[in-house]
Image (cartoon, rainbow, N blue to C red):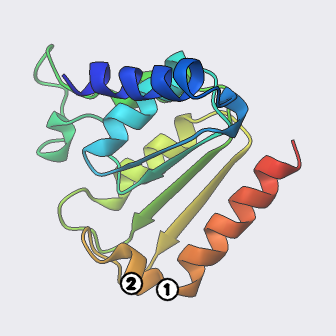
Amino acid sequence: HVYGDTEAAYQHLVRDRGVPPDRIIAYGRSVGAGAAVDLASRRPLAGLIVESGFVTAFRVMTRLPLLPFDKFRNIDKIGQVRCPVLVMHGEADEIVPLWHGQRLFQAAPSPKRLLAVAGAHHNDFMWVAGERYAGALREFEALLRGR
């Protein structure tokens, strides 16, 4: 169970390794965004980074909320996050269209940042974004250090 694994990793860092929660950043890419958003909605963290994340798993296939057991309901959880959020998404993402990232960004609490990159697809975002990717991470780190 992905949520249980994420919780176990968090507890290991905090309890066993003595890492303060305000030094932990959850990062989730694509399906991994579900675990990262879930953790950030339940636990204190320094920050949350969502790359190519989706609103819900089934909404990747359709905009309509057809199934009540929809997995990874990121859109329902991201509003409960209490740390800064960085959402990154490719404008040419053919697997998880850009509107997913835009909706997650809109629903996230402030402070938040959005990096949408023209020409970036689902599996080449970091390479297409290049220095903009590194710059967004540096700016996010500066935001976290300034809190």
| Type of amino acid under label 2 | Trp
* Residue 48 image point, x, y percent: 56, 42
Q: Residue at x 74, y 42 (%)?
A: 111
Q: Which amino acid lies under the numbered mark 1 shown in the image of this protein?
A: Gly
Q: Which residue is painted at 20% across and 39% down in the image?
A: 59
SS for dot 1: loop
Name the residue: 57% across, 86% down: 131
Q: Which corner quadrant holds the C terminus? A: top right
Locate residue 64 relative to residue 98 in the image: left or right: left
The residue lying furthest to the front in this view is: 16
Q: Secondary structure at mark 2?
A: helix
Q: Determine the CA span between mark 2 and mark 1.
A: 5 Å
Is 112 placed left or right of 33 in the picture?
right
The crowd level at tag 2 (other Cα within 10 Å; few <14, some 14-19, many 20+) is: few
Query: Up-down: is 66 above or below 91?
Result: above
Q: Return the residue nearer the eye: 15 or 43.
A: 15
Q: Quadrant of the N terminus?
A: top left
- Identify the image quadrant of residue 8: top left
* For residue 119, above or below residue 110: below
Q: Which mark is residue 127?
A: 2
Which quarter of the picture shows residue 19? Answer: top right
| Closer to us: 75 or 26 | 26
Q: Residue at x 10, y 20 (%)?
A: 67
* Count of numbered marks: 2
Q: Are marks 2 and 1 in contact (CB under 8 Å)?
A: yes
| Residue 62 position in % (x across, y down) | 14, 42
- In the picture of the structure, the residue carrying the numbered disc 1 is 130
